[in-house]
Amino acid sequence: MVQLDYAARLASLRSTLADVLSVVGVDDLRARIADLSAQASVPDLWDDPDAAQKVTSALSHAQSELARIIAVQRRLDDLEVLVELVNAEDDEQQAQYAAEAESELAAVQASVGELEVQTLLNGEYDARPAVVTIRAGAGGVDAADFAEMLLRMYLRWAEQHRYAVTVMDTSYAEEAGIKSATIEVDAPYAFGTLSVEAGTHRLVRMSPFNSAGKRQTSFAAVEVIPLLEESGEIEVPESDIRIDVFRSSGPGGQSVNTTDSAVRITHLPTGIVVSMQNEKSQIQNRAAAMRVLQSRLLIQRREEEAAKKKELAGTITASWGDQIRSYVLAPYQMVKDLRTEHEVNNPSAVFDGDLDGFLSAGIRWRKRSAV
């Protein structure tokens, strides 16, 4: 009987997980959950719906993070037991269960790796929910179709991780695809994770919209900002904005195309435009749009301050290029990140939401580049 020797790999996983837990601070996380649970149990909590929403959302995020850590710890414990059981079997049964042990080891390694990457997300806004906007770029109808493919990709990724995701606004193109779309991903560290997706994405394929069947290159831009809590840090005077109301567009549904509930806010000094049509109420859409506008203005101000500091220091080269990733469907199959060199040869899986490899590589790359 051949003994399966996973001792070194299991010890390495234990060591990595211990490092992760020390950074996360599990005791502090449990204390935070206890405090938030106490706040959530106050009888008059929902007398202030906005405050109640913040408490329950924070509690849900903290509980989700702790549950994820506990699940990984249990899987690692179970894996060690599984390896011992496999080694105790005879040759025939050992061969039967060895593949299961190897598969579970790979899965636990991936889960520990994801937790390890999360410890790198220590930026000011990394723990916040994310607002992702996809816009069609150069490439005509193909670009609009590509933008819709990216929208589906991010939605599938969020769904696979069971993250709450909301389509806040969609502007449909005339022939196919979308001009733009905005989604909110409400999950722990959503902004820190998805922020590495910001930039220009390129698609190369045989165009389904070209009668000659020629290869077409098209582009789409992805913007990622954190959804910040309402605060007085960014004041937006009424004189600085123009508010337009209109009827929601797109596929039908209750209250769609029946009332002027959609809201578009234009920030006149900067030209920033935010549209919201997810909610049925014009008041709710206006509040959501103002929140996103304030987030964008705050991030813009921080970026301008950082750029000024770099200029004064004599460093003017940006660390992130505009074109970050290429999706090639013809003449070969490949998706490659141009910053990290991470690539896969299965574009279909990527467009179906298999993004974790790119996200992890991007977060690690950004951390190395910041040193």
Image (spheres, rainbow, N blue to C red):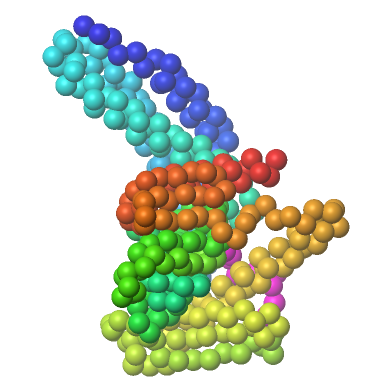
Give the prevailing secondary structure in the magenta stretch. loop
Location of residue 155 in the rendering, given as x and y in whole percent from the top left corner? 37, 62
Q: Magenta segment: does it hold 334?
A: no
Q: How many marks?
A: 0
Q: Nearer the viewer, residue 51 or 351?
A: 351
**Which residue occupies the extreme left position in the image?**
92
For image coordinates 27% across by 21% down, the residue present is 82
Q: Nearer the viewer, residue 43 or 265?
A: 265
The answer to whether one can see residue 94 in this image is yes
Q: Which residues are magenta?
A: 225-236
Q: Nearer the viewer, residue 158 or 212?
A: 212
For image coordinates 72% across by 68% down, the residue present is 301
Q: Magenta segment: does it hold 232?
A: yes
For image coordinates 40% across by 45% down, the residue present is 344
Location of residue 241 in the rendering, given as x and y in whole percent from the top left corner? 64, 87
For image coordinates 34% across by 93% down, the residue present is 258
Instruction: State whether residue 121 is above or below residue 307.
Output: above
Residue 369 lies in quadrant: top right
